[in-house]
């Protein structure tokens, strides 16, 4: 208004509420989004639409028909945006040999707009998020370690089945990934998801077939599956 930025108190109230839910109640991004939806708080896109009659979305009906549609990613962007304490982060612009470029150095420009929250509040949310990221990394490392140990166990196995043979000596039917998963769990107590078992060829003939068992997105075990004829 008249070249000046002014706080829209209704929207500012939502921003402050999001920071409160994150810092004081310890809710995750997704849980905050669900809370906002349940309390019928307008989404940023719908709030903008009410004020301007415009929609910043490739699918306007999605915004207009779902005024309370919050997503965890929206909450995350708000909690990480320095604009809410009045500061803009820009990349430093350098000029060399007449060429203007942006480098990777970040520059804080304070007091660009009126602050909705204090910098202390923003920094507290940032600190919590950094702690969460560190915990997530530690938990992920534990999952990879456990999967790697299970890989050693599984790759030492020979998972054996018996099947009927026809007069021509060929095997009747196939061995399913469900059967393989159940047998691995029975033999090792390692929890295996049948949907994570793949093979280049179906297990439909006697002999040994190598299958891949995904224990983690970074850990794939190669397991030998043997099918013997019933004598």
Image: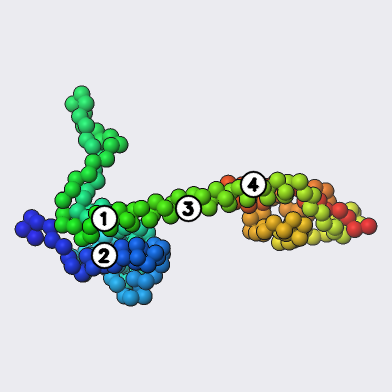
Badge 4 element: helix
Q: Residue 135 has which mark?
A: 3
Residue 140 x %, y %: 53, 51
Q: Nearer the viewer, residue 140 or 23?
A: 23
Is residue 77 in view?
Answer: no
In 3D space, how far apart are the residues under numbered discs 4 and 2 (Cα atoms)?
A: 44 Å
Is residue 137 in view?
Answer: yes
Residue 166 x %, y %: 89, 58
- Tell me the colour scheme of the image: rainbow
Q: Are marks 4 and 1 in contact (CB under 8 Å)?
A: no
In 3D space, how far apart are the residues under numbered discs 4 and 1 (Cα atoms)?
A: 42 Å
Q: Residues within 10 Å of mark 2 (few under 14, many from 20)?
A: some
Q: Quadrant of the C terminus?
A: bottom right
In 3D space, how far apart are the residues under numbered discs 3 and 2 (Cα atoms)?
A: 26 Å
Q: Nearer the viewer, residue 73 or 230?
A: 73
Badge 3 element: helix
Badge 1 element: helix
**Mark before the other along the chain sequence, 3 or 2:** 2
Taking the spot 19% from the left edge, 57% from the top edge, the residue there is: 115
Residue 68 against residue 114 in the figure, above or below? below
Residue 173 against residue 206 in the figure, above or below? below
**Mark before the other along the chain sequence, 4 or 3:** 3
Q: Nearer the viewer, mark 4 or mark 3?
A: 3
In 3D space, how far apart are the residues under numbered discs 3 and 1 (Cα atoms)?
A: 23 Å
**Mark before the other along the chain sequence, 4 or 1:** 1
Residue 67 against residue 155 in the figure, above or below? below
- Dot 2 corresponds to which residue? 16
Badge 2 element: helix
- Dot 4 corresponds to which residue? 148
Q: Residue furthest left?
A: 2
**Mark before the other along the chain sequence, 4 or 2:** 2
């Amino acid at each position: 208004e008249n070249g000046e930025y002014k706080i829209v108190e209704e929207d500012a109230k939502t921003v402050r509420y999001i920071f409160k839910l994150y810092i004081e109640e310890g809710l995750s991004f997704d849980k905050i989004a669900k809370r906002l939806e349940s309390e019928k708080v307008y989404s940023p896109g719908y709030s903008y639409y009410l004020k301007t009659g415009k929609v910043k979305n490739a699918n306007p009906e999605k915004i207009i028909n779902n005024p309370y549609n919050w997503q965890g990613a929206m909450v995350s962007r708000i909690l990480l945006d320095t604009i809410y304490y009045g500061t803009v982060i820009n990349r430093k612009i350098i000029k060399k040999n007449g060429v203007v470029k942006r480098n990777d150095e970040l520059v804080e420009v304070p007091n660009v707009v009126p602050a909705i929250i204090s910098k202390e509040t923003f920094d507290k949310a940032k600190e919590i998020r950094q702690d969460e990221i560190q915990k997530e990394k530690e938990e992920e490392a534990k999952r990879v370690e456990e999967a790697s140990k299970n890989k050693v166990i599984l790759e030492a196995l020979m998972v054996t089945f018996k099947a009927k043979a026809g007069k021509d000596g060929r095997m009747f039917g196939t061995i399913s990934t469900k059967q393989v998963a159940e047998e691995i769990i029975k033999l090792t107590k390692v929890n295996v998801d049948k949907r994570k078992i793949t093979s280049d060829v179906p297990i439909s003939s006697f002999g040994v077939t190598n299958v891949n068992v995904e224990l983690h997105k970074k850990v794939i075990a190669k397991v030998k599956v043997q099918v013997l004829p019933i004598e």
